[in-house]
Image: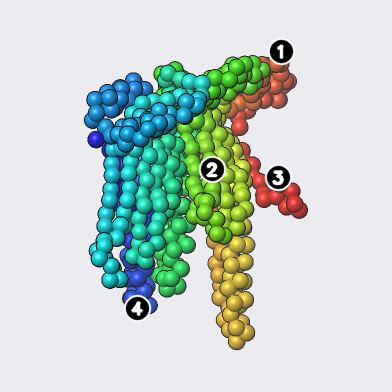
Amino acid sequence: DVNALFGVGSRVSVDPKEAAKNALATVQGAAQSLSSLDAKAAAASAGAAVAKAIDKAVNSKDAQLQQLRSQLLAPLNELQARANELLSQAQNGSVLLLGTIVDSLGIDGVSSSILNPGVAGLPNFAAFGITDLKIEFAPPTNGSKFSRLTTLGATVVATQAWTLVGSIQVTSFALSVLMSTDAAGNRKFSGYLQGSVALGQGFVFGMYVPFNQPGQQIELVLPQVTVAGVDVNALFGVSSGTSMSVSDIAGKVSESVQTLGEDAKSALLTQLQQSAEQAKALAKQQLRSNLLAPLSELQARANDLLAQVNNGSILVLGTVVDSLGISGFTSATLNPGVAGLPNFAMFGLTDYKMEFAAPTNGSKFSRLTTLGATVIATQAWTLTGSIQVTSFALSVLMSTDTAGNRKFSGSVSGSVALGKFVFGLVVPFNQPGKNLEFMLPQVTVGGVDVNALFGVGSRVSVDPKEAAKNALATVQGAAQSLSSLDAKAAAASAGAAVAKAIDKAVNSKDAQLQQLRSQLLAPLNELQARANELLSQAQNGSVLLLGTIVDSLGIDGVSSSILNPGVAGLPNFAAFGITDLKIEFAPPTNGSKF
């Protein structure tokens, strides 16, 4: 059915996010009806029900998007075949065209030709066909003898393609509109348009534009780009435009559970926050494994991406420019041809996000609240010498709060090869709580992290003294909230808590010292075995050596040999490896933007 090809028929369906909200409201009501003694049980029940509802909503949304993708992103030859079949049916009278209706009226001087504007970029509206019509009446009210029109809707589709500009062609198009009337007589108009657009003779993307449909958003439907069966956005730790992270879910629920009792709310939010933290840690570990994949695997991914570009499966910037057909402006202009810079024409758009909010302050137009995109490099490029960017992704997001304040944020992530050594880099900007990540492979000797062998803490470890200070600050804050009559009890409690924290810190320090002693004073043969294992890893490219960095720069007359002083008693510094790096930034102060 041609309507199914455009997802028509969803006028009466319930948005999955709305269903989740309804489930949450139901659970809140049930929780409130319980006594305070049952608060924790209510919170657990609420958490389970909310999680289940949101999971169902997200899965439903994913299923809808996947269905829409399969319909709108069919191969170009299949879309053209559909258009030809529609045109054939229109010509044999099987489709009710707008032109047929006008001609049938038999009005002198008025024919279907008036529906063809003959303007570049616009279609022949006479060839638009009505494929769906919905009319509903309600029983008479207020003493009237006539039924009331409550619903009137229709869907029209284009039975032939048309060119917008250059080689940008609308290959399929549908417009669905609906007028509904509530019990009070208020009328509401809604609908959407959607279709497929071809850029040149290869790439096709879909577009879905709803209007006056709460919970529905504009969808720019791009082909899902996968490498070795994995979504390419996931390889760079970028969430898709329609996905909801665990943190997002926790945030949404946090806003909605304010009506719960304090105990129930606290238990529920703690549970959700723990899930969010676990998901965040897992995502970080996954990102590390993706960015620090072996060089051969990264090169295979790049080749896979380039092959998909060549067969028209990825929307690259060069295709967009060439499709515009502007004289003197082609994809070649996106290639700067400067050493160290990539060919931007080969950057592909893999994710797009646009969201609108309901009109406010008497306006009739929706507000743009979110606009974002992700572009990736579909081929590697050389920075200098043998330093090569093997993978790269840039994700940007503009969001607007309820007060109208706009915020720009995003991230750059990718993998860089120094010869055969690979490291990962994640550079977030304007994302509180996130810091630049310079990802080095974990170097282990005998199954133990090499940093731990030297008593070096990892980048994310907490110093026990800092933990004690934090405990003290927390207890002091709690003591201050108590009345003066409870001062002694508060002081005793604070003293006990701080003493416990410091004791833990001291014991931890002793344990660390004992561990360090056993590692540094190991038998000589064990120390020699460690050294041999490290050297082996350095030779196979698993350790970032200072010599590798110098050689990768490709500076004439400068090589790793300059790091070897050749002086008795001094080491070869070229064989020193970087095993840990820590960089942290604080928020801007004093009006600075950096």
Name the quadrant containing residue 259: bottom left
Q: Kindly report which numbered mark, 1 or 2, lies closer to the viewer in this rendering.
A: 2
Between the C-alphas of marks 3 and 1, the distance is 36 Å
Q: Amino acid at mark 1?
A: Asp
Q: Nearer the viewer, residue 363 or 115?
A: 115
Q: Secondary structure at mark 2?
A: strand
Q: Kindly report which numbered mark, 2 or 4, lies closer to the viewer in this rendering.
A: 2
Q: Nearer the viewer, residue 577 or 69?
A: 69
Give the residue pinned by disc 3: 594
Q: Amino acid at mark 2?
A: Leu
Q: Kindly report which numbered mark, 1 or 4, lies closer to the viewer in this rendering.
A: 4
In the picture provided, is 537 more to the left or to the right than 311? right
Between the C-alphas of marks 3 and 2, the distance is 23 Å
x and y, in percent, of residue 325 in the image:
54, 19
First in residue order: circle 3 vs circle 2: 2
Give the residue pinned by disc 1: 556
x and y, in percent, of residue 10 in the image:
31, 47
Any mark on residue 443, and which?
Answer: none
Q: Residue furthest right?
A: 590
Q: Secondary structure at mark 1?
A: loop
Give the residue pinned by disc 4: 35
Give the residue pinned by disc 2: 371
First in residue order: circle 4 vs circle 3: 4
Residue at (32%, 36%) from the top-left corner? Answer: 105
Q: Amino acid at mark 3?
A: Phe
x and y, in percent, of residue 443 in the image:
51, 33
Label 3: few (<14), some (14–19) or many (≥20) C-alpha neighbours in 10 Å: few
Q: Nearer the viewer, residue 323 or 259?
A: 323
Q: In the picture, which quadrant includes the C terminus?
A: top right
